[in-house]
Image (tube, rainbow, N blue to C red):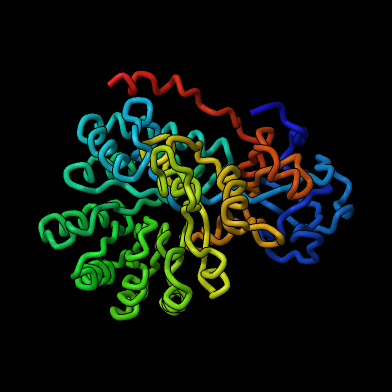
Amino acid sequence: MTRAFVSLPDTDRFALKNATMPAVAVDGFSAPNREGLVAADLIIADGNIEAILPPGTAPDMAFADMDQGMIFPTFVDMHTHLDKGHIWPRKPNVTGDFMGALSAVKEDREANWSADDVWARMEFSLQCAYAHGTSLIRTHLDSLAPQHRISYEVFSQVRAAWKGKIDLQAAALFPFEEITNTAFFTDLIDVVKSHNGILGGVTQMVPDLDARLDLLFQAASKHGLDIDLHVDETQDASVLALKAVAEAKLRNGFEGSVVVGHCCSLTQQNDDVAKATIDLVAKAGLAVVSLPMCNMYLQDRYAGRTPRQRGVTLFHELTAAGVQTAVASDNTRDPFYAYGDLDPVEVLREAVRIIHLDHPLDTTARVVTRTPADILGRADHGRIKAGGKADLVLFSARRWSEFLSRPQSNRIVMRAGKAIDAHLPDYRALDELMEG
């Protein structure tokens, strides 16, 4: 991070004057101006937001002048893979496609994923996320035996160590072909429950998909677990498990939360099929998360051929139908995505470009703040409100054009009203692991 653009008062009570905030991420304060932004003064006291006031009305007290700089709540990254993160240097994906990623990760997992290895890479990833301003993360954990016992145990240790800095959730990731393996699935449920996790999986278009989904929904209902699935991560128009997931939730009367990630093949359906599926997703109350950076990297990749597809779902149509929609990082420096740094600002900037979340930008900020927080059942994250914690990210950018045109590397991350050390960890810290 470069030098901060403003100095915060060294006191427990102070004002952030002349700030600009995305209205969609602010509770109890209206009158947005152009592109959904509001001007305000914030009063910070004892680590909380004491008040949100009209600009220029803060009382005489210690203050920092934001000079119209933007303030966001800390971010929510609702779909990541912390257990895979940063293995690229020792196991690159030489083809850059989905099958190459599956093969490379399998080889690396079987050869290298000890408890120490997984812990070190998770720790590094969270240091990155924390420095960038994230306070809530859901990760998917590869959950084929025996890896699930190693990774969940490490995850629980990491979750406890990061308590108060980043809140963590974990969803089990496994191929649906294994769900009919009673011994495996029973053991997996035991592990997920014991670590306060979430059931997940990768849906596959098999003849008995409905029966497999019923097994999943019935198990989740019986054990009080939420569900977070990888669905239709392909441009193959014949793949539409999304419809089956929505039908299964309705058929089983499931009352828990269900998240579906990717849903890319929906863009390849004809309009009538897509609309019918979207209406069913809305009726079932599914939440959809798009992973635009990773899916653009993996999909429609053929040597010597320029890609034609964007790798996203029908984001605007789903949102218009009342479906909760968000974006997230997905993979980070692993065979599924060679890049990334768990920075929601990068995710937001790229999503605006890839999904056209602009013109207008009035509610764009919600996709990495309020909406994913609500989907994950953590309304204490992703919004700025009087009485809430002063967990904020401060930017010198004053308008969306400025915010979206640069990486915002001079941001200030505040936790409980204090600026944190936002230096990013050096990749050299992982060198010893990459020698394996």
x%, y% of residue 70?
Answer: 74, 47
- Left or right of residue 136, residue 255 in this image: left
Q: Quadrant of residue 87?
A: top left
Q: Quadrant of residue 55?
A: bottom right
Q: Quadrant of the C terminus?
A: top left
Depicted 295 relative to depicted 157: above or below:
below
Residue 93 visible (yes or no): yes
Q: Nearer the viewer, residue 187 or 230?
A: 230
Q: Nearer the viewer, residue 357 or 370?
A: 357
Please report the residue visible at 32 percent of the width from the left and 55 percent of the height from the top.
197
Please report the residue visible at 89 percent of the width from the left and 52 percent of the height from the top.
56
Please report the residue visible at 36 percent of the width from the left and 68 percent of the height from the top.
242
x%, y% of residue 245?
Answer: 33, 70
x%, y% of residue 267?
Answer: 46, 63
Please report the residue visible at 33 percent of the width from the left and 25 percent of the height from the top.
90
- Left or right of residue 34, residue 162 in this image: left
Depicted 395 relative to depicted 425: above or below:
below
Residue 158 visible (yes or no): no
Q: Quadrant of the N terminus?
A: top right
x%, y% of residue 51?
Answer: 75, 57
Question: How many numbered discs?
Answer: 0
